[in-house]
Image (cartoon, rainbow, N blue to C red):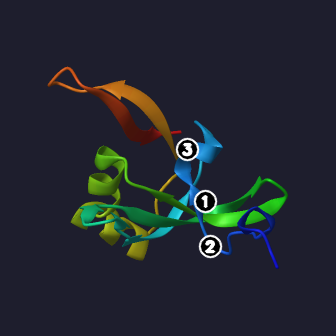
Amino acid sequence: MTKLSDTESSGDSVSLAKIGTEAFTPIAAVQSDYTEGDAVTAGVKITTKESFEIDGVEYNKLHTTRKAVVTKMLSEAVQAAMAGEGLDPVKCVPATFANGKSGFKLEDA
């Protein structure tokens, strides 16, 4: 018998939170919602020009449900830029929004 704790995840992406505020260059982004039970949270999977080593594994895809990041990455302007001339590097940083709530946003690196 195999214990659940002895198995490894085989996903092709890692949480954006795992790279902290490191810069990355998005080359593609697709909607990738997160489902837990009956609840669905909007998400995005971002393919990057760079690779990041996390726990000994190289990843060039990051996933997140951070609302401001999801909205920005799936916007028409960002999608068009990635399909055309490309985007410059960005980073995900902590932010306080106009409504007083704290979260994370993308900014130029």
Res 58 quadrant in image? bottom right
Contact between labelled residues 1 and 2, with CB atoms less than 8 Å apart: yes
Q: Residue at x 37, y 53 (%)?
A: 65
Quadrant of the frame with the N terminus:
bottom right
Image disc number at residue 65: none
* Position of 68 relative to 40 (above/below): above
Per the image, the residue denoted by label 2 is: 11
Q: Position of residue 87 (x, y in %)?
A: 46, 59
Instruction: Please rate how many residues cluster around mark 1, counting C-alpha atoms within 10 Å: few if below 14, some from 14 to 19, many from 20.
Output: many
Q: Residue at x 17, y 24 (%)?
A: 98
Contact between labelled residues 2 and 3, with CB atoms less than 8 Å apart: no
Per the image, the residue denoted by label 1 is: 14
Q: Mark 3 or 2 closer to N-term?
A: 2
Image disc number at residue 17: 3
Q: Residue at x 24, y 27 (%)?
A: 97
Single out the residue that lies furthest toward the bottom.
1
Looking at the image, which is closer to me, 63 or 6?
A: 6
Instruction: Please rate how many residues cluster around mark 2, counting C-alpha atoms within 10 Å: few if below 14, some from 14 to 19, many from 20.
Output: few
Instruction: Examine the rendering and report whether any part of residue 22 can be seen.
Output: yes
Q: Position of residue 44 (x, y in %)?
A: 39, 64
Left or right, residue 47 beside residue 75? right
Q: What is the C-alpha distance between the residues marked 2 and 1?
A: 8 Å
Query: What amino acid type is highlighted by mark number 3?
Result: Ala
Give the secondary structure at mark 1: strand
Query: What amino acid type is highlighted by mark number 1?
Result: Val
Query: What amino acid type is highlighted by mark number 2?
Result: Gly
Contact between labelled residues 1 and 3, with CB atoms less than 8 Å apart: no
